[in-house]
Amino acid sequence: MTDHVNGKAGARADLCRFLSACYYEPNTDFSEEHLFDSMLAAASAIDPDLAARARKLGAAFMAQDMETLLVDHTALFIGPAQPRAMPYASFWLTDDQSMRHEATMAVLDLYERGGFDVSEDLHELPDHIAVELEFLYLLIFAQNQAQLGGNAEEQSSANVLHRRFAVEHLGTWVGPFAAAVNAGAETAFYKELAGFTERFVRIEASSLHLN
């Protein structure tokens, strides 16, 4: 039973990293490094529906030419005007522009509590969806390590931070964000990515009730 739990936790952590990569600019590395094969393997260890979505996501990527994917990625997440689906938590957490800096700082506080250092080379705001998924990876990894080490205090602390982030933060804005991606996407790949992301975050949040 313990090996099964640890294996599933490892798959959840891995899937965070793979999913994060999908929100950066698409490139041939996705195929050359077998990103979607890895996503399918991780998703299969977590949930059958998530595995089915992973298959569709990989197929949608392979069926589309790279130039079209790049155009869609730019329109969705970059601009030139306002992106069709703002990839920043602060945009979805408040309609008051004067409060968005405070929302971003709250994310940075969670990062600090989790020992997550945002690289100085990062050319995105710290509340970008890709960065938040990388932090979720770190939280799941920390939980898994605490469980393996049998440290109840560390595990409790990791669980609390995980819940605050996955349920009270990421879980509150992933729905409208995914809906915006689905509505604004011109390619099947980004429509599938939207559904996959929301489904994974919902599964992750619901798993906290089992801890």
Image (spheres, rainbow, N blue to C red):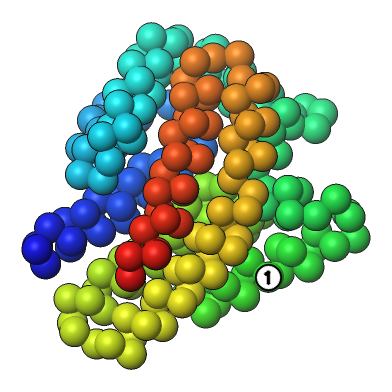
In percent of the image, x 52 and y 31: which residue is there?
A: 194
Q: Is residue 179 visible?
A: yes
Expressed as whole percent of the image width and height from the top left, the position of residue 52 reads 30, 26
Q: Looking at the image, which residue sits at the far front? A: 209
Q: In this view, does 66 lie above or below 99?
A: above
User: Which quadrant is the C terminus positioned in?
Assistant: bottom left
Amino acid type indicated by mark 1: Ala
**Front residue of 80 and 2:** 2
Q: Name the residue under label 1.
A: 106
In percent of the image, x 33 and y 85: which residue is there?
A: 154
Expressed as whole percent of the image width and height from the top left, the position of residue 150 reads 19, 84
Q: Is residue 201 above or below residue 37?
A: below
Q: Is residue 31 above or below residue 47?
A: above
Lateral position of residue 184 relative to residue 160, left or right = right
Q: Is residue 115 visible?
A: no
Expressed as whole percent of the image width and height from the top left, the position of residue 172 reads 63, 53
Q: In this view, does 60 lie above or below 100?
A: above
Image-quadrant location for residue 28:
top left
In percent of the image, x 52 and y 79: which residue is there?
A: 113
